[in-house]
Image: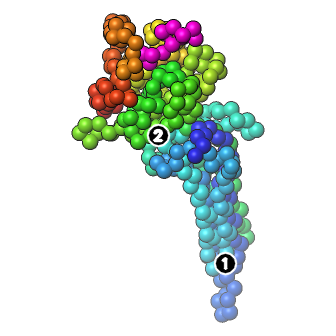
Amino acid sequence: MKFIDEAVIEVKAGRGGPGARSFRREKFVPLGGPDGGNGGRGGSVILRADLNVHTLLDFKFQAVWEAQSGQGGSGSRKDGKAGDDVVIRLPVGTQVFKCEPDSSEPGELVVDLDAPDREFVLAKGGRGGKGNSFFKTATNQAPEHAQPGEEGESGTYMLSLKLVADVGLVGFPNAGKSTLISRISAARPKIADYPFTTLVPNLGVVQAKGGRSFVVADIPGLIPGASEGKGLGIRFLKHVERTKIIAHLLSLTQLTEDGEEADLEELFDCINAELKSFSEELAAREQIVVLTKADSVSSPERLEHFKKRFQERGYNVLVISSVVGTGVEELVERLAKSAFV
């Protein structure tokens, strides 16, 4: 399934049916009077957050959503049938923004579908017109007037999916994010020893002790200059905006372009600079430092050096090896503690 997290749609609610202009005419019933029924209401366009929907791909192929119009009223005071509603099922976490006509730029936030089964009426159907029987009064016994139905609401909207996760994994390419998420959950992202193995966010449900479970999001593509469009840019960072804690992964085997051992503090600060350029609030989110690939570290002294340096800066530091399993259980429990605060 292709991951699409933005789409523009047009919606139009149904028009209300017209009221009927009718007079009762039956044999042996003099002065039957007006009996025109009311028109049915137009169908509405309704959004619903659905846990079984994971991408906005369908909206790339169906950009126009239109509800059914109401039927007109008829004689004998028969009201017209209401138009059927259209229910658009969206992934949980989808934000809906109003767009100006002929523009795909997002404007005002209309609704945030941040909980399963949450519904919102995006475009309300038009009211049906009143039949002439409605206008009968003591002084107007035979009204000729009946109302037309009202137009339904319409508009252009931008859908923007922002994944709902408790924990966000960030770090340089090859920091071990995909390996970790495959170790602690049922997610099976592509894993290889070259940059940008992961091209879209991955979600995994993690089971902790005591029957607790939480959702982890693996965010790909962060490198220096991501805020300027380098690598995969920062377009996926919105998927960690809802997280309660960020696990910042740093590989103990990371090398520079010259083949030298990288300074992990510099890498850490580079990624945080990209987070800050995207969102001050996101950059201020609680972080724990996870030193990965401990089974392949060149020297214990290197591990202890960076562990001490980050602790001196006030960070909680965990050392793991996703391949061997060292420290993974401790990490899961630490993340669970923050996820259930």
User: Answer yes or no: do the residues labelled 1 and 2 have beta carbons within 8 Å?
Assistant: no
The quadrant of the picture occupied by the C terminus is top left
Q: Would you say 131 lies left or right of 182 here?
A: right
Residue at 54 percent of width and 51 percent of height: 89
* Res. 188 mark: 2
One can see residue 206 in this view? yes
Q: Amino acid at mark 2?
A: Arg
Q: Mark 1 — residue?
A: 75
Which residue is painted at 49% across and 37% down in the image?
A: 189
Q: Residues within 10 Å of mark 2 (few under 14, many from 20)?
A: some
Give neighbour class at mark 1: few <14, some 14-19, many 20+ (Cα, 10 Å). many
Magenta stretch, overall SS: loop
- Compared to 174, does 256 lie above or below? above
254 in the magenta segment: yes
Image: magenta residue range: 251-262
Place residue 134 in its image quadrant: bottom right
